[in-house]
Amino acid sequence: MILPDGATKTFKPSFAGSVKTVWNKVVKDFLASKSDWLFSTHDDIVYVPETLTHLLSWDKPLISALVFMRHSPVIPHIWQHYEGRESYYAHRIRDTRAWFYDHQEYIRFGPFVMPEKPADALVEVDFTSTSCTLIHRSVLEGMQEFIHDEWFVCDSEETGGGEDRRFFTYAKIAGFPGYVDRSCVAGHVAGDIPSSAADFIMWDNVSQFNGTGEPEIKGLETDNPMEIK
């Protein structure tokens, strides 16, 4: 991993165990240090050496590489909240598809970083995966007013589920919206093959041909998305 000039890194593995217990201890240890940035990466993610410096170049306190689901459907791990007769989150398929068709040189296999990043590569999101996310310490400190020392908690401690929605929701409440850099793609590994932008476009083309790809894929239905424990 390429570091900015003068920077040093400390590797802190979060061993198998409860997200609520292990991950939050990592954050506490980080805040007790003099470090400025926490780079959260999961063990099923691969990225190119320039990923960290590329994300830093946007000067955003909370920013992620674009990650796609590792199993079919290979859709972007970018979620948008919809409020109407029902409240739910859905994957942002249509605008992600349109962006890649506007920037076809970014339709590639595997992880990559495009050095000439267009301004519209950066998109604000309701939440995304924390599997390749750069977090400034000010975000974690700001969240403490609302979550105390529980930055990471699964949607359900009984049945599991992701920790991402809750994290990004409280970060936004604290004044730190999340962003995704679409010119920086991290591969999401299933077996030996990481999913990426080209896999998404191929899935989308097949879905369109079969007439199954138009509706957004919904999930995480909730009566009130802000009532998160």
Image (tube, rainbow, N blue to C red):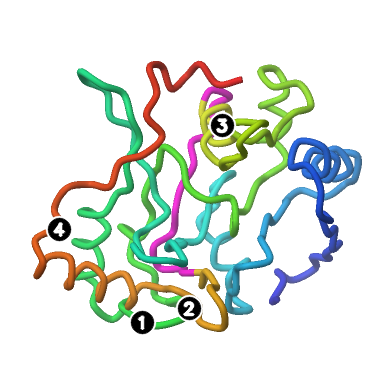
Q: Circles 2 and 1: CB distance less than 8 Å?
A: yes
Is 51 situated left or right of 92 in this image? Answer: right
Q: Amino acid at mark 4?
A: Thr
Q: CA distance from mark 1 to mark 3?
A: 31 Å
Amino acid on which the number 2 mark rests in the picture: Phe
Q: Is residue 146 above or below residue 71?
A: above
Marks 4 and 3: which is nearer the front? 4
Q: Which residues are magenta?
A: 173-185
Query: Sequence-wise, which precedes: disc 4 or disc 1?
Result: 1
Residue appearing at x 38%, y 55% in the figure: 122
The mark that comes first in sequence, 2 or 3, is 2
Q: Counting other residues with Cα less than 10 Å from the Cα at mark 2, is it few (<14), some (14-19), or many (20 or more)?
A: many
Relative to residue 24, is residue 49 drawn left or right?
Answer: left
Residue 37 position within the rendered picture, expressed as x and y whole percent measured from the top left? 72, 51
Q: Is residue 126 above or below residue 208?
A: above
Pick the quarter of the image with the C terminus: top right
Which disc is residue 212 wearing? Answer: 4
**Quarter occupied by residue 126:** top left
Marks 4, 1: nearer the viewer: 4
Q: CA distance from mark 2 to mark 3?
A: 28 Å
* Label ID, residue 108: 1
Q: Which residue is mark 3?
A: 166
